[in-house]
Image (cartoon, grey):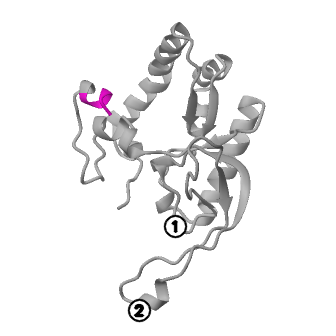
């Protein structure tokens, strides 16, 4: 399944995104400040460059900012070269913006492509820092071939210094609250009280 960025073809989605950056960000910052909460914000590079003042308010309030693609592109629809270009640019943009390199990130759509040079393997120990690997390779199951051809172990690459914050759709409030046109299980509005029970 391919989930293209919802904002690609919807003026409503684009308007909602602009509202989120220009209005929602300030509301969240006010709430976090009131209760003394520090958070990690995973911000696409496009948002850093398009809403610089709003994102500066996040940075200046002492919140951490992590990598989250450039335009919330789906890595599964990209080549390895495109993924590297996006990661290189967003790493550079965020480092310049924050004055220090990011310590981690979450892939847009919570998914790296199969052929990615950066894979999100396992979280091994949830209470320990987990660092991404680069250069992992594996063989996909292909039912048109004999099982012997695809029953191969994962070949791990090298560990990097970039931390991974594991994403989990089961505890994320986005899927039940947003209609994603390309997702067959997306059903739009869910009562916020039900989401709070997640």
Q: Residue at x 64, y 28 (%)?
A: 64
Q: Is residue 177 left or right of residue 126?
A: left
Q: What is the C-alpha distance between the residues marked 1 and 2?
A: 21 Å
Vertical relation: 93 (above or below) 75: above
Q: Residues within 10 Å of mark 1 (few under 14, many from 20)?
A: some
Q: Residue at x 62, y 20 (%)?
A: 53
Q: Is residue 194 left or right of residue 160?
A: left
Who is closer to the viewer here, 121 or 66? 121
Q: What secondary structure is found at the residue carrying circle 1?
A: loop
Instruction: Say whether residue 21 is magenta.
Output: no
Residue with the mark numbered 2: 146
Q: Residue at x 33, y 41 (%)?
A: 175
Q: Quadrant of the N terminus?
A: bottom left
- In the image, which residues are magenta? 194-198
Q: Position of residue 171 (x, y in %)?
A: 38, 39
Residue with the mark numbered 1: 114
Q: State if disc 2 and disc 1 touch (CB < 8 Å).
A: no
Q: Residue at x 43, y 31 (%)?
A: 17
Q: Is residue 27 left or right of residue 159?
A: left
Residue at the outermost top position: 34
- Secondary structure mainly formed by the magenta segment: helix
Q: Earlier in the sequence, mark 1 or mark 2?
A: 1
Question: Foreground mark, 1 or 2?
Answer: 2
Q: Residues within 10 Å of mark 2 (few under 14, many from 20)?
A: few
Instruction: Say whether residue 197 is magenta.
Output: yes
Q: Position of residue 18 (x, y in %)?
A: 45, 28
Disc on res. 141: none
Vertical relation: 73 (above or below) 147: above
Q: Position of residue 57 (x, y in %)?
A: 62, 18
Q: What secondary structure is found at the residue carrying circle 2?
A: loop
């Amino acid at each position: 399944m391919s989930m293209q960025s919802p904002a690609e073809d919807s003026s409503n989605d684009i308007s909602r995104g602009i509202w989120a950056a220009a209005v929602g960000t300030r509301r969240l910052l006010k709430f976090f400040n009131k209760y003394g909460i520090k958070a990690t914000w995973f911000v696409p590079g496009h948002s850093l460059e398009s809403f610089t003042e709003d994102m500066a308010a996040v940075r200046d309030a002492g919140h951490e900012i992590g990598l989250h693609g450039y335009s919330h592109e789906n890595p599964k629809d990209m080549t390895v070269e495109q993924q590297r270009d996006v990661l290189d640019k967003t790493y550079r943009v965020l480092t310049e913006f924050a004055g220090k390199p990011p310590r981690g990130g979450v892939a847009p759509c919570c998914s790296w492509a199969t052929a990615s040079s950066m894979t999100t393997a396992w979280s091994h120990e949830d209470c320990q820092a987990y660092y991404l690997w680069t250069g992992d390779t594996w063989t996909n199951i292909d039912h048109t071939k004999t099982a012997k051809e695809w029953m191969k172990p994962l070949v791990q690459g090298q560990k990097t210094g970039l931390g991974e914050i594991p994403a989990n759709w089961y505890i994320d409030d986005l899927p039940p609250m947003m209609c994603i046109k390309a997702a067959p299980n997306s059903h739009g509005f869910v009562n916020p009280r039900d989401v709070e029970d997640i």
